[in-house]
Amino acid sequence: MKISYETKSELLQKLEEIKENITKADKEYQFAFARGDFESCAVWKNTLAFNRKFFGYHIKYQIKRGWL
């Protein structure tokens, strides 16, 4: 996966989008778990894990560029 941004503001905008996705996936995962819908729970858990990992890649990129 190649991550490339020209400006810090582009990266920060993408990080905000990912944060929103994390929040949504976490909320849906918790609701699915509370309902006992374990098929849906697994889907949202995987989505949550993917978004957290993706967020980490972007933070590492931000650190490497010295934009932190």
Image (cartoon, rainbow, N blue to C red):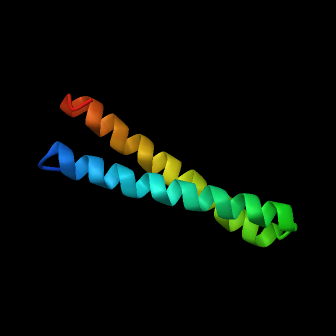
Drawn side of residue 64 relative to residue 40, left or right:
left
Which quadrant of the view contains residue 33?
Answer: bottom right
Can you say which quadrant of the picture contains the C terminus?
top left
Which residue is pictured at 18% across the width and 43% down the height? Answer: 8
Which residue is pictured at 43% across the width and 41% down the height? Answer: 56
Is any atom of residue 33 visible in this view? yes
Horizontal and vertical percent for residue 6? 12, 49
Q: How many marks?
A: 0
Is any atom of residue 4 visible in this view? no
Horizontal and vertical percent for residue 29? 70, 60
Drawn side of residue 44 relative to residue 8, left or right:
right
Q: Of residues 67 and 1, which is closer to you in this image?
A: 67
Q: In the rendered view, would you say 7 is above or below 34?
A: above
Horizontal and vertical percent for residue 45? 67, 58
Which quadrant of the view contains residue 40?
Answer: bottom right
Which residue is pictured at 67% across the width and 64% down the height? Answer: 28
Q: Residue furthest left?
A: 6
Q: In the rendered view, would you say 34 is above or below 65?
A: below
Can you say which quadrant of the picture contains the N terminus?
bottom left
Which residue is pictured at 57% across the width and 61% down the height? Answer: 24
Drawn side of residue 16 relative to residue 12, left or right:
right
Horizontal and vertical percent for residue 17? 38, 58
Q: Of residues 32 and 53, which is closer to you in this image?
A: 32
